[in-house]
Each structure stands twice: as C-alpha cells, then as structure tokens.
Image (cartoon, grey):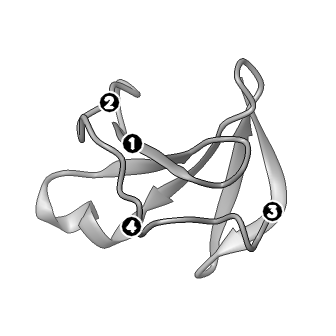
Amino acid sequence: MFIPTHKKWQKKRIYKKKEDDSFWYFDYYHKDQGCPHYEVFDKQGSHMYEANAETGEDISKSKDIIKSISNIL
C-alpha cells in the first residue's frame, strides 16, 4: 500500500501511497499527546490533511497552507 522513499522531513521518512501518489509521514510530535497521526500531502507536496494513525481517516478536515514538503520532493 505504501512505498518508502529516500526523502525525509526532519528525520522522518516520507512514504508514497501507491493508490493515489500522495505522500505521508508520521507526526511524532503528537505521539505522546494521545493523537498520533500522519501528515498527508498531494503529489506536489501541498498539505491535504492529517490522518488517524490507526484508521487512516481524515481527522483534520482541512488543509494547512503553511505545511509543505514540495521543496523535498
């Protein structure tokens, strides 16, 4: 379902989802705060949403225009 890339953001491995070519990384910052999630980006590296770490469901319901990994891709 996911392919690991050689790209990293702040030491976090970025994964590419085969199904839709989106990019995902685990947001460790929130791990101990009871809301572990993935940051999800489109093909161009623009933020799409935050996904629940267990279900993959969209938990943010909005894009964060400040977040981007386009300079890494």
Which residue carries the number 1 mark? 49
* Comes first in the chain, label 2 or label 3: 2
Of all residues shown, which one is farthest toward the front?
Answer: 65
User: Which amino acid, by three-letter code, is at mark 4?
Assistant: Tyr
Q: Is residue 32 positioned above or below 11 on the image?
A: above
Identify the residue position indicated by label 2 in the image.
58
Give neighbour class at mark 2: few <14, some 14-19, many 20+ (Cα, 10 Å): some
- Which secondary structure lies at badge 2? loop
Q: Quadrant of the N terminus?
A: top right
| Within-10-Å neighbours for mark 1: few <14, some 14–19, many 20+ | many
- The image shows residue 2 at horizontal and vertical percentages of 72, 33
The spot of residue 57 in percent (x, y) is: 34, 25
Q: Which mark, by number, is residue 73?
A: 3
> Mark 3 is on which residue type?
Leu
Residue pointed to by mark 4: 28
Which mark is first along the chain, 3 or 1?
1
Q: Quadrant of residue 32?
A: bottom left
Which badge, 1 or 2, comes first in the chain's sequence?
1
Instruction: Say whether residue 33 is left or right of residue 66.
Output: left
The residue at the point 34 percent across, 48 percent down is 37
SS assignment at label 4: helix
Quick one: 29 or 58, which is closer to the camera? 58
